[in-house]
Image (spheres, rainbow, N blue to C red):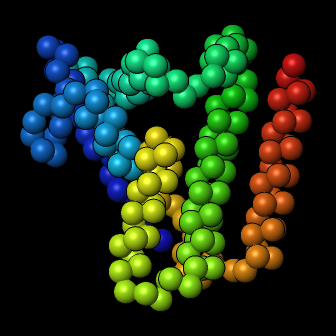
Amino acid sequence: MATEEKPLLIKRYASRRLYNTETSDYVTLEDIAGFIRDGREVQIVDLKSGDDLTRQYLLQIIAEHESRGENVLPVNVLNDLVRSYMLPGGGLMPQFLQSSFDMLRESQSKMVENMNAMNPMSKMPGFEAMQAQQKAFLKAMTGGMSGQWSGPGEDDKAGDEKSGEDLDAIKKQLSELQEKLSKLS
């Protein structure tokens, strides 16, 4: 398994400017959103206090995109998020969201893998470049939600039977999450 890449360290100065420690230049929130869309993890810290400000800035990026009409989160989801803050201990919402995004990432990678396995063009020269474009397209269509590509390795490839089992497992997990959420209501 590949070693996980260290997060890109961004320092916030007293002037509220954000400094990329890798490239030694100042960045904007839009630059940070671009790093994340490209699959890079970021960590934003206050230079003076050392406080981790990552969550605050990520929420600010989401709020700015939403205010520009780039609505990704339906109002009922936003309401549920606000409600989850009112529950003692935050409820199950964080775990549910994490599981949902993990399942989405896994489904995307399996879909691309299955498309490639069944595609007779995979033997043609230049197919790998086309495959890279396909992955970039999926990443762009999902707004970078896929994060770093976490698709299965070569030894994980299997036929339709395995795909059916995976789909059944995903359905079971979703059903279990729905049961837990209904018990909270």
Point out residue 8 in the picture as x, y percentages from the top left corner: 28, 44
Image point (35%, 49%), residue name: 38
Q: Is residue 52 visible?
A: yes
Q: Number of labelled discs?
A: 0
Image point (62%, 63%), residue name: 111
Image point (58%, 79%), residue name: 119
Q: Is residue 85 visible?
A: no
Furthest residue to the left? 24
Taking the image as shown, residue 52 lies to the left or right of residue 145, namely: left
Point out residue 159 in the picture as x, y percentages from the top left corner: 72, 80
51 vs 119, nearest the viewer? 119
Taking the image as shown, residue 91 lies to the left or right of residue 72, namely: right
7 vs 154, nearest the viewer? 154
127 vs 42, nearest the viewer? 127
Q: Is residue 36 above or below residue 57?
A: below
- Is the C terminus in the top left, top right, bottom left or bottom right quadrant? top right
* Quadrant of the image occupied by residue 151: bottom right
Q: Is residue 163 above or below residue 181?
A: below
* Quadrant of the image occupied by residue 178: top right
